[in-house]
Each structure stands twice: as C-alpha cells, then as structure tokens.
Image (tube, rainbow, N blue to C red):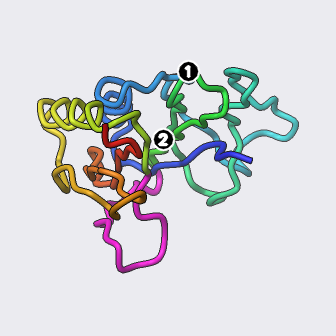
Amino acid sequence: MFISHVCISVQDLDRSCAFYRDVMGFIPLTPPEHIPMLPDRPENAPETHYSYYGYDCGVQCFRLNKNAKANMAVMLVDPTDPNVGCIEIQCFTDPKTTYVEQNYITTGIKEICFSVKNLAELKEWEAKLKAAGVDMRTEIWDVGDGALRHPTILFHDPDGNILQLSCTSVE
C-alpha cells in the first residue's frame, strides 16, 4: 500500500500551481480547471480521468459539498517512481476557500513531508527555497539522534500549508 494522493486546499490556484511546479519541481498532470461538484454534474455525464503510470489522477466528481464550486489541478511529485502519488490542489470559488493558520495543537494533517537523498541535497533545497523567497518555518535541524537522526527543514507553501523536507542519510 502507498499513498495515492494528498489534497491541499488553497486560495489562489495559479499561484499555488506555480509554486509546486517552479519551486518544488512537480509535474502538472491536469490543467487548472473548474471541476463540477455533485449534484451539479449532469446525470450520466462522463467523468474526466487523467492517467500517469497507470495512476488515475483526477476525476471531475466530488462529494464534498453539494453546492460548492472549485478549481483544481493535479501534480505528480516524482515522474521516475510509479509508487509516488500526486498532490491535488483545490481552490474553492463558491464558497471561497478561507485561510486558517496551521499549527500543531489542533487535529488534522499538520505537514506533508518529502524525502531527499542526503544532507547535501537537503542543504541545496534550503538554499533554493530561500532564494525563491519561501516562508521558512525552520532552518535545517536534527530530529532524533544516533541511528534515528534525520535532518529536516519545515517551510510554508503560498497558503501557509506546512511542508517538510527530510533525509535519513546524514552523509
């Protein structure tokens, strides 16, 4: 079993797509577009599917809020690995997505962590993120010690969602 995808709610789809494409290096699989929500989708209307490595990367059909309207895009994290899922970026337009500050003392997903190969690559990412003006939550710091040590860094996407880069090799 592996994670199929993670859905991130944002306030500006174009801005977020640019961040995940240009800064994070993710590959767009779908164009940003309006996705009809149920029951707005006509009866028997075909669903639109996007596929990459045989992975079904998007269906124009959600059961989130029967009156909601949203724009979305799907981005592939690593095109070289068919076991790595996608990031689904959603921007609700009616009602509009609202900003909620992310913190660790409430329920819900707190961060999305991506692995890099080693400490040298993590340092390259830190420099790249800073050069891109990304809101950094931490500098590189060690989580754990001994055999469990893994350097990590936390930062925000344009909507304040917390992202993490981590490595298990300190060489």
Q: Is residue 135 left or right of residue 158?
A: left
Residue at screen point 70% across, 56% down: 63
Disc 1 target residue: 79
For marks 2 and 1, give the CA distance. Answer: 18 Å
Q: Quadrant of residue 50?
A: top right
Q: Nearer the viewer, residue 39 or 125?
A: 125
Quarter holding the C terminus? top left
Q: Quadrant of residue 22?
A: top left
- Check disc 1 and give the amino acid type: Pro
Disc 2 target residue: 89
Q: Is residue 81 left or right of residue 45?
A: left
Q: Position of residue 155 (x, y in %)?
A: 25, 50
Q: Position of residue 134 (x, y in %)?
A: 18, 41
Q: Which residues are magenta?
A: 94-112
* Magenta-span inclusion, residue 52: no
Q: Nearer the viewer, residue 80 or 53?
A: 80
Q: Earlier in the sequence, mark 2 or mark 1?
A: 1
Q: Is residue 78 above or below residue 8?
A: above
